[in-house]
Image (spheres, grey):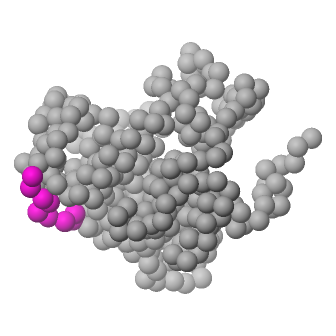
């Protein structure tokens, strides 16, 4: 009988795990600079920290020695590590896919919805990484998988790299955007950042028409053209302070843009500045009663309304905030 995953991990050298994780991230994004790579390392719960350029270069050299083609990071490539050749193509046998499907079936029948969703997301990402659009042998009528097809690795990478380049070059974009409420719109947008969410890729930018920051779904952008004018404004950063309590306060690892502003035996206060808050809010929601947003008031109100909406949906009662 095979060993449990936790037992297997204990026998893996942590430096080797970091190297493998970096390889997987390069397979996923194709090109990452030091800041982006360190952010991913921070977000990995098994690593939870970033590294200086010397250490990262050592890990990258390990990948080069085993056959990965990764040119040197210079100002010509925005000091990024780009994976041009991967000697370890990922592949899954039909039997392995069948086992993955059966495990997902078992998790779907269990009360732990979070575990099921996490495993489902893992299998979607794995299917994406191997470059196939298989549904892991699951039938849609079982209700276990969404009707939408899985992400296509090549298209996902292409869109991510394309719009990240637009953000780096900082020229305004003329877009044809299919708004779900207003139909197809012609927008002039100053691009700031490409954000990855569970539901897809999004462009954060300034709408020159309304002078408001907007989060645009890349799948809804029908056409894009760079204009000759440069960005005139920088993204408006929001300062958020949140508190964590109990065991979470003791075990919490700061993200790259976060810093500790208060600490006690049972409570910590964390401060961060960011241009778009929806991703942070979704992360804080997972912490449940162990987390509270202290400021700004607007984000705290949004969090409260979201929780009230969830509770109303669970109890079958209408959301009063939506009625008012």
Asked if the magenta segment contains residue 114, the reply would be: no
Q: Position of residue 8 (x, y in %)?
A: 82, 54
Nearest the eye: 114 or 47: 47
Residue ID at (42%, 47%):
197
In which quadrant will I find the N terminus?
top right
Viewed as shown, does residue 41 lie left or right of 172? right
Q: Is residue 255 above or below residue 199?
A: below
Question: Where is residue 229 drawn, in percent x and y?
Answer: 9, 55
In which quadrant is the C terminus drawn? top left
Identify the residue at horizontal 48%, vertical 25% (top origin). 149
Magenta region: 228-236
Q: Residue at x 76, y 26 (%)?
A: 95
Residue 154 in view here: yes
State the image quarter where residue 272 is shown: bottom left
Horizontally, is 184 left or right of 251 in the view?
left
Camera-nearest residue between 120 and 297: 120
Q: Indicate left or right for 120 with 3 as reference.
A: left
Q: Nearer the viewer, residue 81 or 170?
A: 81
Residue 105 visible in the current orientation: no
The percent position of residue 118, horizontal first and vertical second, equals 60, 43
Q: Residue at x 54, y 66 (%)?
A: 42
Magenta span main SS: loop
């Amino acid at each position: 009988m095979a060993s449990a995953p936790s037992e297997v991990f204990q026998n893996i050298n942590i430096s080797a795990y970091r190297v493998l994780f970096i390889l997987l991230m390069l397979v996923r994004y194709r090109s990452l600079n030091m800041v982006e790579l360190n952010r991913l390392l921070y977000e990995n719960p098994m690593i939870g920290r970033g590294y200086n350029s010397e250490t990262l270069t050592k890990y990258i050299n390990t990948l080069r020695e085993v056959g990965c083609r990764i040119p040197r990071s210079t100002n010509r490539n925005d000091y990024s590590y780009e994976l041009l050749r991967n000697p370890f193509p990922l592949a899954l046998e039909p039997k392995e896919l069948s086992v993955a499907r059966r495990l997902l079936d078992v998790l779907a029948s269990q009360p732990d919805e979070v575990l099921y969703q996490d495993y489902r997301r893992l299998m979607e990402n794995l299917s994406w990484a191997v470059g196939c659009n298989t549904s892991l042998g699951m039938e849609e009528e079982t209700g276990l998988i969404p009707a939408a097809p899985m992400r296509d690795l090549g298209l996902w990478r292409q869109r991510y790299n394309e719009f990240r380049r637009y953000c780096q070059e900082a020229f305004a974009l003329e877009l044809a955007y299919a708004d779900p409420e207003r139909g197809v719109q012609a927008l002039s947008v100053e691009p700031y950042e490409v954000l990855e969410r569970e539901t897809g890729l999004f462009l954060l930018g300034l709408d020159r028409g309304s002078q408001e920051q907007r989060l645009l779904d890349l799948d809804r952008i029908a056409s894009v053209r760079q204009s000759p004018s440069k960005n005139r404004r920088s993204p408006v950063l929001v300062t958020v302070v949140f508190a964590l309590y109990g065991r979470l306060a003791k075990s919490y690892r700061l993200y790259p843009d976060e810093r500790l502003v208060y600490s006690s035996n049972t409570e910590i206060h964390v401060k961060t500045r960011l241009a778009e808050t929806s991703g942070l809010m979704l992360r804080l929601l997972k912490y449940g009663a162990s987390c509270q947003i202290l400021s700004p008031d607007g984000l705290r109100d949004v969090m409260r309304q979201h929780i009230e909406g969830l509770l109303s949906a669970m109890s079958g009662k209408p959301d009063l905030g939506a009625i008012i």
